[in-house]
Amino acid sequence: MKFCSHCGKEIMDEAIVCPGCGCGVQVRSVENSYCGEKAESSKTAIILGAVGIAGAILLAIVGHICSIIAIILGIIDCTKNRKPTGLILGIVGEVLSVFSSLIGAALVTSMF
């Protein structure tokens, strides 16, 4: 099974020109048609995990939000691509966010 690299329409194996858009055929397989989506999900999870870690140190609320999103995207990425990097960074970010929140709460209560 082939797909047009320009419009993504399914084309016959013997086709030289795509009947959908008329462009010359550059073939990609079904497995490769989703590679861009998988790579984007992985990058997003890693970036949000790193932001979660930085946010945990700087601002616990931002760390919580980014870390939770990174954990969710990391779980999706881990099940699709078997790459746990985003998930691990998200968990580390959330642990640091909780730790930062506890320290902040302890400091605030000690002031009163």
Image (tube, grey):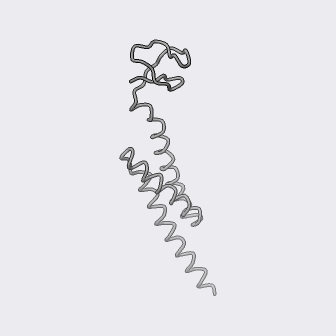
Locate residue 56, reporting x and y percent: 54, 64
The single residue placed furthest to the right in the displayed view is 112
Q: Is residue 30 left or right of residue 19?
A: left
**The furthest residue to the bottom:** 112
Q: Quadrant of residue 3?
A: top left
At x 39%, y 49%, the residue is 78
- Closer to the camera, 11 or 45? 11
User: Is residue 77 depicted above or below 13 in this figure?
Assistant: below
Give left or right: position of 78 versus 93.
left
Asked if residue 90 is positioned above or below residue 38 in the image, the reply reads below
The quadrant of the image that shows the N terminus is top left
Percent from the top left, x then y, of residue 73?
47, 52
Query: Could you say which quadrant of the image residue 54 lies in?
Result: bottom right
Q: Is residue 82 left or right of residue 93?
A: left
Q: How many marks?
A: 0
The spot of residue 92 in percent (x, y) is: 44, 61
- 87 is higher (above) or lower (below) than 109: above
Q: Quadrant of the C terminus?
A: bottom right
| Residue shown at the point (50%, 54%) measured from the top left | 50
Camera-nearest residue between 9 and 25: 9
Is residue 11 placed above or below 83 in the rendered structure? above
Residue 88: x and y, percent? Answer: 41, 56
In this view, which residue lies farthest toward the left? 82
